[in-house]
Amino acid sequence: MLTHLLAHLLLLFVLPPLLAGVIARTKAVIAGRRGAPLLQLYFDLWKLFRKGMVISSTTTWVFRAGPVIGLAVPVLASLFIPMGGIRAPISFAGDLILFVYLFGLARFFTVLAALDTGSSFEGMGAAREVTFSCLAEPTIFVIFIVLARISGSFSLDPMLDSLQNHIAHPEAGVPLLLAGVCLFVVLLAENCRIPFDDPNTHLELTMIHEVMVLDHSGPDLALILYGAAMKFLVMGAVLVSFIMPPHPASWFMETAAFTSGLLLLAVVVGLVESAMARLRLIRVPQLLVGTSLLSIFALVLLLR
Amino acid sequence: MANVVNIILVAVILLNFYVLGTSRLGACVQAVALQGALLSLLPPLVNGWSIHGLGLAGGAFLLKGLIIPWLLLRAIRQLRIKREIEPRIGYIPTLVLGTVTTAAAFIFGDQLPLLPAHLHSMIIPTSLATLAAGFLMLITRRKAITQVLGYLIFENGIFVFGILLAEAMPLMVEAGVLLDMLVAIFVMGIVMNHINREFSSSIDTDHLNLLRE
């Protein structure tokens, strides 16, 4: 039990920056560049944590709270999901709602911290972030309803148990596939990846997430970067858990397979980012509503 | 076998959504062509390999998958239009309506008094959902070419329904239906050309409302 918990925390704290590095490296290779080292984000974090920071005198404690909560939430949320062979440390009926709204809490504080600076640019980013996330939320819930229906449980840990889902319910293959596609799109939207937001751009008029954190520097920025990478890991873990083919083996092997699944997911995200351009802002709601409808269709297929 | 059929039917419904939600005409035509080609695989898969089934499949594939899309793409090139600019109902509401009708089709399909063999197949709901998507296209779009696409999707829905009857239906009837459709597309192509010529580079059917004595 204790080894499982330690392995869980180890994965959670060590892996996220590597995933970000894999995405960046994939994009670089596709573009024909050599690219930054895979461990670049670790170096960046180390550098940022040793720096001082400048805090605007117009801000209050809310400005400092944003990054801290942005890091604490993915850590908390990860406790409800299994990681490969490691079962979720905490699990109770209905924890899926807590899981979704924990991220809502993080978003709320990021937005407040952005508004706290009084910059109109950051207000614009905050407005966009809130709009898009409220369109993405129905999709997540419908996907969770699909999974709950298949597994007959309202707790994330059994819901994401791919072994049980695939073998006990072979007829659920198509809805699961649709749910996986929808969750992938939501993952891109929630983590500000390319068709929705460009994590590399610093052009104020087009960016969403980056514009909200413009005023953070030093350790605060490091917390934000680390929290964002961790959020990608947690949401990616949900996707990988229920898409991964069943593999009855020791928990260690299962976790290794799960980790390589996450790395594969990072490569796929990198490929998507290389192949697609950013959507026009006006098209983003269209795509997100389309995903919600697709997930509802998956539910209809499952319920008949 | 039933699995492959189900996957094809789900793909058909997803293509319905895609066509309802996209504004680019070229992509729409390609999606409808893909839908037709997928559907032409169904008769042999559902009813087994027979000359009759293969004839149906081959005819449908040629017409729905190749000839009609080619005609439409040619029309798009000649008329130099790329997008449906202003549908009567926007894309998101159309998509929502499409999902509602699809859900309704699944609910309604399960209520019908069918043969026990067809009771829980996806064929009837898919057919109804595709019919509804075709209707939606016909109702909500302004351009003649998207309305033709709606008509094609509508015909695809009827084709799915016809698969259940393929054993009973003589090849001549099906051939006649396909031929009718081809003629209809020709006529619509001519209509499009006329609209285009009369109203200088536009195939908006709303112009036709003004043709009064």
Image (cartoon, coloured by chain):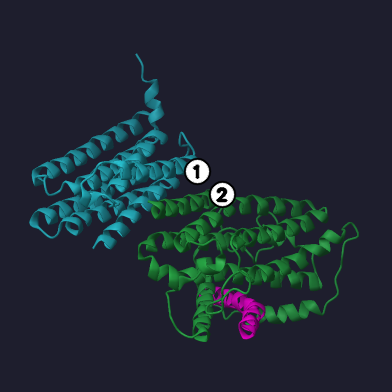
Chain colours: A green, B cyan
Q: Tell me the kind of residue under disc 2.
A: Pro
Residue sitting at the far right: A57
The span shown in magenta is: A1-30
Residue sitting nearer the eye, B211 or B111: B111
- Whether residue B26 is visible to the viewer of this picture, yes or no, is no
In the picture shown, does residue A138 fall above or below B196? Answer: below
Q: Which SS type dominates the magenta stretch?
A: helix
Are tags 2 and 1 found on a single chain?
A: no
Report the Cα–Cα distance between label 2 and label 1: 9 Å
SS of the residue under disc 2: helix
- Please state the horizontal and vertical placement of residue A89, each as a whole percent of the image: 62, 74
Mark 2 — on which chain does it sit? A
SS of the residue under disc 1: helix
Q: Tell me the kind of residue under disc 1.
A: Ile
Mark 1 — on which chain does it sit? B
In the image, what residue occupies the spot 75% across and 58% down? A109
